[in-house]
Image (spheres, rainbow, N blue to C red):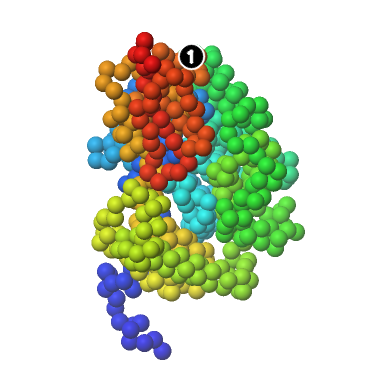
Amino acid sequence: MPTAEETAPSTALGPRAAVAFLTARPRALVCLLFILWMLPGLVGRDPWKPDEAYSFGLVYHVLHSGDWVVPTLADEPFMEKPPLFYLTAALLTRTFGRILPLHDAARLACALYMGLAFAFLGLAAKELYGRGRGWLGALALMGCIGLIDRAHYLITDLSLLAGFVVALYGLALAPRRWILGGFWLGVGTGIGFMSKGLLAPGMLGLTCLVLPAAFPQWRTKRYLATLGVAVLAALPWLTIWPVALYLRSHDLFYDWLWVNNFGRFLGLNSLGPKAKLGYYLGVLPWFAWPVWPLAFWALWVQRRDIRSNAGLHLPLTAFLVGFIVLSVSRDARELYALPLLPPLSLLAIVGLPLLRRGAANALWWFSLMVFCFFALVGWYYWVALDLSIPARLHAHLLRLRPAYIPNGQMLKFVLAGAFTAAWIWIIPRLPRNAERPLLAWTATITLLWAIAAVLFIPWVDSANSYRSMVVAIRDAVPAHSRCVSSFNLGEPQRAMLEYFGHIVTYRETEPARKRDCDLLLVQGRRDEMHIPDESWRLVWEGARPGDNRELYRLYQKKPRGKG
């Protein structure tokens, strides 16, 4: 018999009614989780080293010059990647830069491309597995540990990820609607190309070739026509900017195409971190948690039906091709594994309902324990950081970030407390079904990120930001100086010097950039610094607050005839 509480009408604004509304409408719940997942940490901080700082430097150039052909960092061509992400960020900065700091407005591009990735992954999941399954694709991707912090950085890998997902949707749609499928396949390939060059066309092209070679269901005239439409749809993306760049400068085109595409992949230059054998085998177990065990469980349970199960062909092929291509590349970073997450998320949808009860309960209870442990630790450290209890831990945390000034304690407390209360209220009320463990995990990782961002990002930003150091350098620059040369100065630092200090530096080691400057800025480590000859005198020395490794020195040319 239903209780009186169950039969009583619920108010539209009551907490129980809100939970019931969200759990009965999973797409609305996923949209709410995306907002909570995306907004914290997106604004309210400076660009961080390394990727964000130089990426914003490229956006800053587009804002001030309007040049969309040659990516330029601190007045110097930077041909590592095509400009799509930087152009998008610059457009958003022009739109929202009046109400947000420029770097925060630029970071809205992260939300745009992540929104596209989640939306198109949901569409791909719906196309592959039927109605009512699309929201699970977005939910699975959102729960990946390796994605959550990187999705908030101003990096081109986010538009690359969106391009991959759009292309996967096009391939998933192709058997039913070949023209529209080919269009989205071409557009996704183009977005990926304009984000990071030849990687996306290479991986997606190999995927398109392997599918018919491995599975007879893809050996159709309709699929061939899909590829033809995809080529036409991708052609503007693949030609307009490269042709414009070639017409502008043959040398810059060669630098982009060979040095930063083939050269990086083949290891023919010193750019980027070099790969170790089995690198991604060591990265994926935590980077792709929890989708990889669900994906491999799906493949194991349905191992005899892989060739006949069309829902496995596309994600399995896309993952294997991507994994092999990344593994044979001579450059490797955790960040490069982002394109492997969407196919694993699609396979996880298949594996989720196949989980045995014990495994499903284990993921459920693991989610609960993870939240309880890290939430308690986070609150404990915040009390120490902002309320000075206990005093020894408070002093230790301030020694790590000496520029941090505790402020806004009440606002932090209210926001983080609301996120904590939301988890405590919603999780026990989730419906008992096959999706509950994944929903609990994604809600856990989302709200933990929100709590951490609210409580600790100002503390982290106080040391990661270059603002105070650049202002100190700017104030130390003597009046009427001609220009500033640099030695060993990194790309992030050059970008932040231009942004915060309006200082453009000229590298001593580059003949095309070398100038007869009366100031020299040297970057190095405290135990290994370049010391110029006796014709220079030291006028400033410093580093970011709390940074015990990097050191910067500003020298001024001595007047001739003086020792």
Tell me if 13 is positioned left or right of 191 in this view: left
**Residue depicted at x 61% and y 50%:** 283
Q: Identity of the amino acid at label 1? A: Ala
- Please say if 388 is above or below 496: below
Residue 307 position, x and y percent, is 73, 52
Residue 349's quadrant in the figure? bottom right
Quadrant location of the N terminus in the rendered image:
bottom left
Q: In this view, does 460 lie above or below 96?
A: below
Observer-nearest residue: 52 or 382? 382
Residue positioned 50% across, 39% down in the render:
157
Residue in the foreground of this view, choosing between 18 and 142: 142
Above or below — where is 366 with respect to 112? Answer: below
Secondary structure beneath label 1:
loop
Q: Which of 375 and 290 is in front in this view?
A: 375
- Residue 325 at least partly seen: no
Q: Residue reaching furthest right?
A: 304
Residue depicted at 33% across the width and 84% down the height? 5
Q: Residue 234 at x, y = what percent?
A: 53, 30
Inspect this view and state whether residue 136 appears: yes
Q: Give the class, few, some or many, for how many residues have Cα within 10 Å of label 1's Cα (few <14, many ≥20).
A: few
Q: Identify the residue under disc 1.
A: 512
